[in-house]
Amino acid sequence: MEDDFSKELIYLTNLTNINPENKFTQKDKIHIFSYFTKNKDQKKDAWLFLQSLQTENDKLEYLKTFITSDLNAAKPAKDEIIKFWNKLSEAQIIFLRSQDMEFEFLPTRFELKDETSLEYTLRPTVAHEFKNNKYFTQNKFVTQNILDDLLKKSDELEDNCAAILCLPDGVFFLGEEKFRSHLLIRNCYLQLTRLLKNGPSKYGCVITGTPGIGKTYFGLFLLYYIRLYYPDSTVIWHKADSQFGTSYCFFPSGEVQIGHFNCFRSIASERKNFYLVDAQVPEGCSAYTILLTSPKQDLFNNFIKPYGFTKYYMPIWDHNEIITLWNACYENIMNTRDERFTLEIVETLMGMWGPIPRSILENWDDALYNEKEFETLIHEIDLKNCMKSVNEAGMSKNSASGRLIHIHVGPNFTDKHYQFASSLVSHTLINLYEKQLGNDLRDLITCSSNQSPIASYRGNLFEDIAHKELSKGGRFRIRELKKGVNTTEIKDKEVEKLEYNWFTTMKHVREDCYNRPKSKIFETIDSFSLEKCDRTLALYQITVSMNHGIKAKGLKVFKRSKWDNSSKKFIEWDESFKLYFVVPSENFETFPWQSYRTKTNNSIKNHPQWIKEIPQYALEIRLDREQIG
């Protein structure tokens, strides 16, 4: 009988030509076989009753009752998770002090504390003498919710706000140490949060993006947000990597239960509640649903079809965000071999993988692994096919495209395009392309403007050629850019041939070289060199776009980034600057003067006099033939 029953189960649960509601998903199959493995005594009665049913749909409907009966028994969650939920409302937002603090209210409403005086342990494994950061913490007499200020200013912030959400010591997000007790509040968290329940996403949304950027951590931030702003709502958290649909249910009372989603269907049927899904296929429900996932179309295609559901892309991190995270949580931590996690390691890994936290933090102390992994992934793909074929379906967590290609996001979080993860990735793939096929990259760039799958990479390809040409030196056509003037005089400029210095940190800059950072240290500057004739720093911004606003923040950071060997600290450059927009021939004669912009592309009217005095030029790179020597 047992063999017959098992065969019947296999047959029925694999039927496809039946009522859709009776179909068994892979999860359902796992549950039904798991149930009868644990409850063998019920097989006989189930088999006899199945025999009495006339249709396959009736049999499947009957079998579904065993799934729901087995899964409708929610249990209290572990003490650590209950503690997390009850202490979440006590979390505080503090600010890592920097010389670019943007909040005028901080000195009056906050007090400045040494890291060692905090009630939070941000770097538990770091020795006391190395804990030298300073933080603004909210004055205990100020009761206003600081998150209100952050949400209201989220579109105005030029740089990351260096805000850190801290749970009380000994309390971990979701009760798990791997999620730590604190997280960096990225600007995009604030901007995306403001979109929830508004406009096209009033019923739910998908938050996706490049693998490894920390979408789960955005979900953890949302738990804090919901706890504060929707105190009467219940939140269902559908766990990642759960074959059995395991979910936490966080109640307003402070109670937390764990069980299959079916345990909480009645709760999910209420519009006032929230359903957060971490990299799983969402169940249909009326609660406001937020799916957090890497690009996996099988997870969200059906989910976003109904009206009122929107797909948003979370941006990759920028250089400054990574450095802030490292400063606050990882600076000076040591591994078991007493090796220290230094800024140089951070910059090296960013130069390799781009600003992706998972790629930088998981194996920071294994240089051999990173080198081998990089080489393996590079040789898995070739340049042209990679650019033509990459799409969201292929960007899984550890795939070549998922590591070597990044999704770049527009200000509205719905527009996106693909770019190589780093200059090193594009440079290496380009060299392999030219070496293996004997093709000139210039031909690929020339034809790529009309090939939409390749067009978004055109900037990467052009940048690589431009760096090589500028380093080789020669005669280039330039024209000074004037505000409100469309046509200006074209002149020839002699550029000195210089050694190509691809540096990791500003300590490795050389005044006698063409200096190119491996990672995007400065938002406005792709490379620079010292023009010895007049001691002027030539700053190069390479672009194929006609509109490339200047990020004033990048210039400010660059100005104080000169490493002084005698004092062993960073000082300000004392040379004057010239800013060259390096453009292809078709853009050269009409390239306009560029305005100064914030990170969010808002215009800046007030900036320091020394920035106003920087002259702008367009510099031509010809793709039809070599530059004139």
Image (spheres, helix red, strand yellow):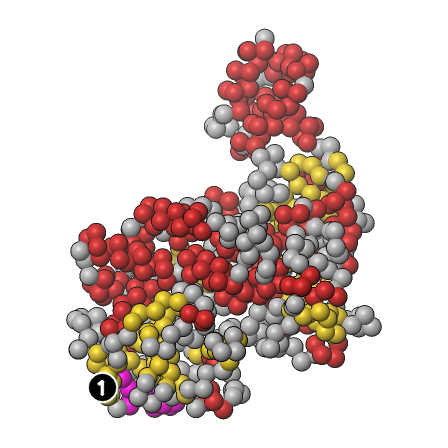
Position of residue 149 relative to residue 378, above or below, is below
Res. 78 visible in picture: yes
Q: Residue furthest front?
A: 566
By secondary structure, the bulk of the magenta-drawn segment is best described as loop
Position of residue 171 relative to residue 157, above or below, is above
Residue on which the image places disc 1 = 492
Q: Is residue 482 magenta?
A: yes
Q: Is residue 230 left or right of residue 341?
A: right
Q: Is residue 512 magenta?
A: no
Q: Residue furthest top?
A: 1
Position of residue 585 relative to residue 327, above or below, is below
Q: How many marks?
A: 1
What percent of the width, then of the height, locates residue 61? 61, 26
What percent of the width, then of the height, locates residue 81? 73, 45
Task: Tell me the quarter of the image containing the N terminus.
Answer: top right
In the image, what residue occupies the spot 49% across and 66% down? 319
What percent of the width, then of the height, locates residue 563? 47, 76
Q: Is residue 162 left or right of residue 250?
A: left
Task: Tell me the quarter of the image containing the C terminus.
Answer: bottom left
Question: What's the amino acid at mark 1?
Answer: Asp
Q: Label 1, secondary structure: give it.
A: strand
In the image, what residue occupies the spot 81% across and 49% down? 253
In the image, what residue occupies the spot 24% across and 55% down? 433
In the image, what residue occupies the spot 62% across and 43% down? 239
Q: Is residue 353 left or right of residue 546?
A: right
What percent of the width, then of the height, locates residue 345? 49, 59
The segment highlighted magenta reads: 478-488
